[in-house]
Image (cartoon, rainbow, N blue to C red):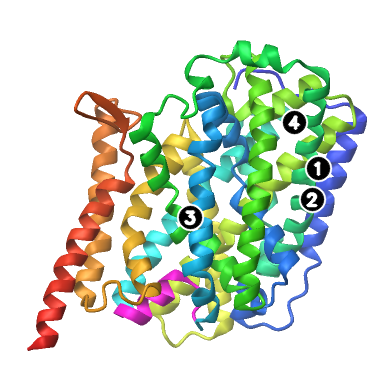
Amino acid sequence: MSQPALNLGPLDATVVGLFLASILALGFSAKVRDNSVLQYLAAGRSLSMPAFVATLVSTWYGGVLAVGDSVKSFGIGGILLNGVPYYAFAIGYAVYFARKVRDADQISIPERLAQRWGKTAGLTAALLVFMLAVPAAHVLMLGTMVHLFTGWSLPISVIVATAAGTLFLYKGGLLADVRAGLLAFVMMYLGFFVIAGWCLTHYSMTDVVQHLSKTQKQWDGGAGILGFVSFFIGASWTMVDPGFHQRVASAKSPATAQKGLYVCVLFWMLFDVLSTITGLYAISILSPNLSGLEFFPRLGGQVLPVGLRAIFFCGLTGTILSAMVGYTLVSGATFGREFFSRLNPGWNDAQIKTATRAGFAVSCVVAVGIALNVQNVVLDLWYAYSGAVVGALLLPVCAIYLRRFCQFVPARWAIASMAGAFFTSFGWLIYCKRTDNAYFEVSIKGQTFMLGTIVPGLVISAILLGIGETMGRRATKT
């Protein structure tokens, strides 16, 4: 982070300032219909199609700076490794999960697991969901934007961005998040249309191709078939992502949730094209030693004229802010409602909301601590740390929505599968870090590929659930 701050002229600074003020104004002006927890955390389950699509698109794509990191690492293969698998799982979610998630009375993953396997399973899931939802990646990216705008140190930028960006959440809950997300959605696409269009009309694509390395030109970014499979498995995160689940559960109807997801996939495909084009130009124009997280903002600062530059910066900042707020809401709700309120079953809505707001603060503190101790968002946070949680949750969550899957598993085996899978994956993570295996690579028949942390957890989870299913069936027959 030794690069100087971005040179924002008076017009740029004014436009960005007005945009951020508008985001905050929309958030703070949100008025909940009543004081219930359902209204606060799920907007009364009344999100219309436009609101559902806009907030889910911007929230799920809040790691926009990490897209630059991905394009820098994998070139044109980035869209296959970090795009196509997510489309597939989002469509799978729409087909198999969406209506069931919206039809259920429960609005969270821990609630559903508690309904199926009891209180202890719900508490175990709540701890895992909290770890998955903590917005460390988004906190780091928003802090990076503040750092580039102001020149402040990264730690100060991260702390200021986190505190200021989540304030309106304490008052308006999901409704405040959705209102801010609508503006972020518009600016997200406008900003990338601006920079992709500018680069295509002012710079030669031939020069871009010449600057790409051999692996950056390959369809798989040099990851290989097994590497692609590993990334594809990583995209299964979609099926257990708590923010994804919350948005679907908050839709106006099951049909809105299902059809809205198909629309979201189209928007994600469009954005992947725009961001990949932008990232490829960044490779050819910027220094190869530049951090991937700075690719997009540095490119905008260098090639765009005053005014257009500000629009692009608004798109970047708004998208990250929207996602950070969304995941802070989910992690705070998990902390207050899914964990502490279950330990105190007599709590009323007011007490649960107070605990949830305390959860926002806890989530932000944890996120800042993690963010300031990572070097690569994609590898360190998403592929490694979060993968350990996804591997523990994926099969139990599938079991509650796919009727023929794990019908007879007793509660103790479901709990054991979550705990065993997480500790196995986390142990693998620690081992790889201590042996300088930063990419979690293994070799099979002479081919090296990235295993990640999801697969070890899935294996253990499948074994324990399989044992539980077998024992449960035998107990039923006797």
The amino acid type, in three-letter code, at marker 1 is: Leu
Q: Which mark is residue 89?
A: 3
Mark 4 touching mark 3, by CB under 8 A? no
Point out the tag, 4 or 3, that comes first from the N-terminus: 3
Element carrying mark 3: helix
Q: Which residue is mark 2?
A: 186
Of circles 1 and 3, which is in front?
3
Residue 425 horizontal/vertical position (percent) = 27, 47
Identify which residue, 400 or 258, lies in the foreground. Answer: 258
Labelled pair 1, 4 in contact (Cβ < 8 Å): no
Quadrant of the drawing holding the C terminus: bottom left
Above or below 4: residue 438: below
Amino acid beneath label 3: Phe
Return the residue at label 1.
190
Which quadrant of the figure has residue 5?
A: top right
Mark closest to the chain's N terminus, 1 or 3: 3
The residue where tag 4 is placed is: 149
Label 1 to label 2, Cα distance in Å?
Answer: 6 Å
Residue 374 in the figure: left or right of residue 227: right
Q: Residue at x 70, y 36 (%)?
A: 274
Q: CA distance from mark 1 to mark 3?
A: 27 Å
Structural crowding at the residue carrying mark 2, measured as other residues with C-alpha within 10 Å and reported as few (<14), some (14–19) or many (≥20): some
Give the SS element for disc 4. Answer: helix
Task: Tell me the SS state at disc 1.
Answer: helix
Q: CA distance from mark 3 to mark 2?
A: 25 Å
Question: What span is colored magenta in the figure?
Answer: 106-118
Q: Which residue is at a point 35% across and 71% down the rendered structure image?
A: 123
